[in-house]
Amino acid sequence: MRISVIGCGYLGAVHAASMAELGHDVVGIDVDRSKVEALQRAEAPFYEPGFEDLLGTTLATGRLRFSTDMADAREATVHFLCVGTPQKKGEYAADLRYVDAAIESLLDVLKPGDLVAGKSTVPVGTAARLAELVSGKVPGAMLAWNPEFLREGFAVQDTLHPDRLVYGLPEGPEADTARARLDEVYAAIVTAGTPQVVTDYATAEMVKTAANSFLATKISFINAMAELCEATGADVKLLADAIGHDDRIGRKFLNAGLGFGGGCLPKDIRAFMARAGELGADQALAFLREVDSINMRRRIRMVELAREVCDGSLLGKRIAVLGAAFKPDSDDIRDSPALNVAAQLQLQGAVVRVTDPAAGDNIRTSWPQLDVVDTPEQAAERADAVLLLTEWAQYRELDPVAFGELVTQKRVLDGRNALDRDRWTAAGWTYRALGRRAG
Ligand code: UDX
């Protein structure tokens, strides 16, 4: 099939290469020339395990190319909308300007019979509005909503082997045509037995925001338990293990620590609340405000804990921060809890040195006031405290004995409950973590 993918950020670039991998003829379109040129040279504009290899192999087949010109989408019959929907400045609502701009320019090249498949995370009601624009301008063209659930760090795997396919279809006879077209796009995935959920537009849009709200709630739930553990001397990690054995609850997404960040969970729960307000249903999502507050409180608590271990004052204290990306295996620093804590510590007078295996260049560009070094050893030199804020495997595996020789004070704060407490305490470190007793 001939496919266009509009918007080549995280979602779009991975989707474009994955569709080519499935055997389709794909053009990825983006307004950012430097991004398009990098992709065309088989260079990933972001860190994502496995993506650059996939890009290289699919470009080499000749089935994939990238362009800044929407006219190149003219040949395609299925057009995936993958542009970003960031949080509006100064508001909770999602900013739909990229979606609107993409649709507007796509309408100029759309033909009767074409299918527009929306993947961006949008406020419920957007698909119905866009469908009217599509059929108003190009009678016979259709729109479906086909949300994407990829996780950064697993983006290729999640796109090629999703755990479900959700199709939000138009009403009436077009539904069957749109469904058949999507089944054809995802033929390999459908044949593999992937569950499919076929819905109306509104349900498909809500599936995405509901899923992200549930995940955020699960994380904030365990972090609320961590607050209580801190007040009682209980251990949140053991608590999570114990409740996680109940398969109605499950252990995944019950890792207490600094909480969630990134380009999705924080802005999606806020946009969901804003949209509920517009629909007169704000009470239904009032709990998400608490989910957000619990999450933000963890960052403040981490700074307090650092002050506590530094004998009550951060002024002039040398602090090593291990990890700055919002999660491991990513260079994404959007709303990163780790970076937020690092910046607060620096603003409060600490001498902060940050290191991250992948996000270094992004921090240097976006936060030039932070001192970024290449290795954990450099960060830890003469440190008064070491903070693990993003649980990269290489930090979890550090040797506490050798690492202890670099620092001035053997104090480690485990912001992700990811280190082996016994190993670190056995090597003479004072171990502190969110939701657990001092070790
Ligand atoms: C998320 C959703 O998982 C994905 O389905 C959706 O398509 C996009 O948003 P992503 O933002 O890549 O994906 O990250 P995710 O793995 O969900 O982690 C989000 C944040 O939660 C990270 O900051 C992570 O460190 C934190 N987290 C996760 C916890 O604090 N505890 C946990 O137990 C799990």
Image: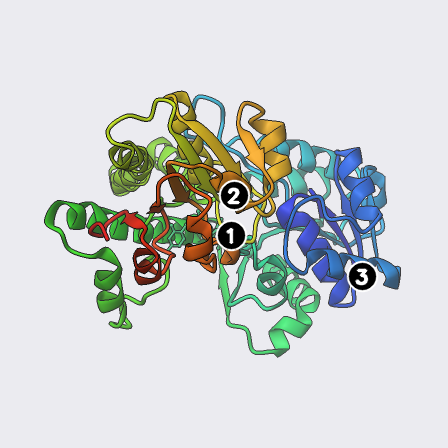
Disc 3 secondary structure class: helix
Is 193 situated left or right of 68 in this image?
A: left
Q: Position of residue 428 (x, y in %)?
A: 31, 53
Q: Which residue is identified by label 3? A: 58
Q: Amino acid at mark 2?
A: Ala
Q: Amino acid at mark 3?
A: Thr
Q: Position of residue 300 (x, y in %)?
A: 30, 33
Specify the quadrant that holds the N terminus.
bottom right
Frontmost residue, 424 versus 301: 424
Is 331 situated left or right of 243 in this image?
A: right
Q: Amino acid at mark 1?
A: Pro
Q: Earlier in the sequence, mark 1 or mark 3?
A: 3
Can residue 108 be spotted in the picture?
yes
Quarter of image, res 396: bottom left
Q: Position of residue 4 (x, y in %)?
A: 76, 50
Q: Report the residue that reaches farthest toward the bottom.
A: 192
Q: Nearer the viewer, mark 1 or mark 3?
A: 1
Q: Position of residue 162 (x, y in %)?
A: 56, 66
Q: Report the residue that reaches farthest toward the left.
A: 232
Query: Residue 328: which disc?
Result: 1
Q: CA distance from mark 1 to mark 2?
A: 7 Å
Frontmost residue, 193 versus 89: 89
Frontmost residue, 329 versus 167: 329
Q: CA distance from mark 1 to mark 3?
A: 26 Å
Q: Which residue is identified by label 2? A: 325
**Residue at 22% of width from left, 66% of height from top?**
243
- Contact (Cβ within 8 Å) of mark 1 with mark 2: yes
Mark 1: is the Cβ under 8 angstroms from ligand 1? yes
Q: Check disc 3: other Cα within 10 Å, few if <14, some if 14-19, many if 20+.
A: many
Disc 1 secondary structure class: loop
